Image: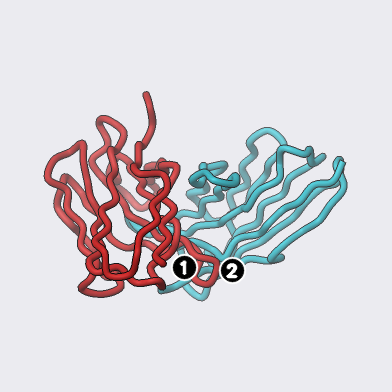
Amino acid sequence: GQQLNQSPQSMFIQEGEDVSMNCTSSSIFNTWLWYKQDPGEGPVLLIALYKAGELTSNGRLTAQFGITRKDSFLNISASIPSDVGIYFCAGANTDKLIFGTGTRLQVFP
Amino acid sequence: DAGVIQSPRHEVTEMGQEVTLRCKPISGHNSLFWYRQTMMRGLELLIYFNNNVPIDDSGMPEDRFSAKMPNASFSTLKIQPSEPRDSAVYFCASSFPLTGGPSSYNEQFFGPGTRLTVL
């Protein structure tokens, strides 16, 4: 099935550093979402974006809906150890979500 | 609210056996989704239901897989016969349906998943 391209695949950073990851698609989406998955758990929604160009924040997280509707970015500022996990983007035009390949984040104290 | 409930959390079975995974969506949600997650293929949508009716099963790998939703509070995903390549984590998610308009979206809440190992 279709998957969105996420980069980087993995990141190893020091606590306190900022993090950036992005997601690209060959198709246009009306909604972009970012999920985080902790080990042994299901994905949890972090941020939802509904309009091209929209910039939305949730605490230390900021996400943007690309103007072309084919990409999205997620930034995490001042990372902490509990930010560890896998981050997935997802695009949607209907009820269905198309997920990205994931970015695995490791934070060292 | 207890969230989406899945059972069992872990299942180990032998090739050829029938496997049944269960899901209880969040009360009031009338859309239900079954996903499969593997290292190689990531998160894939298998099938989803609106108001207990299957809407899109194009992600179901083959005839060995079947899913039912007999009522608003219960769904099953069955694999018969199971094969080693079916080993994966299977997630169920539920949401309210789209309320309308291209800017509407209702968050999908995921269950904890069932880790299936077929030997």
Residue A63, image x and y in percent? Answer: 64, 48
- Residue at 40%, 56% in the rendered image: B12
Q: Quadrant of the C terminus of chain A?
A: top right
Task: Tell me what residue is drawn at x 23 percent, y 63 percent.
Answer: B56
Residue A88 picture location, percent across and down: 57, 55
Q: Which mark is residue A24?
A: 2
| Mark 1, residue position | A28
Q: Amino acid at mark 1?
A: Ile
Query: Does A5 sit left or right of B20 as displayed?
Result: right
Query: Looking at the picture, does residue A105 appear above or below residue B58?
Result: above
Mark 1 vs mark 2: give the one in front.
2
Can you give x and y, in whole percent of width and height, for residue A104 in the image?
Answer: 68, 57
Q: Chain of mark 1?
A: A
- Assess disc 2: are there few (<14), some (14-19) or many (≥20) residues with their C-alpha within 10 Å of its C-alpha: many
Q: Quadrant of the N terminus of chain A?
A: bottom left
Residue at 49% over, 70% down: B41
Chain letter for the residue marked with disc 2 in the picture? A
Q: Which chain is cyan?
A: A
Chain drawn in red? B
Decide which of A98, B33 is in the foreground and name it.
B33
Dot 1: few (<14), some (14–19), or many (≥20) neighbours within 10 Å? some
Q: To which quarter of the image does residue B48 belong? A: bottom left
The vertical placement of B41 against A90, above or below, is below
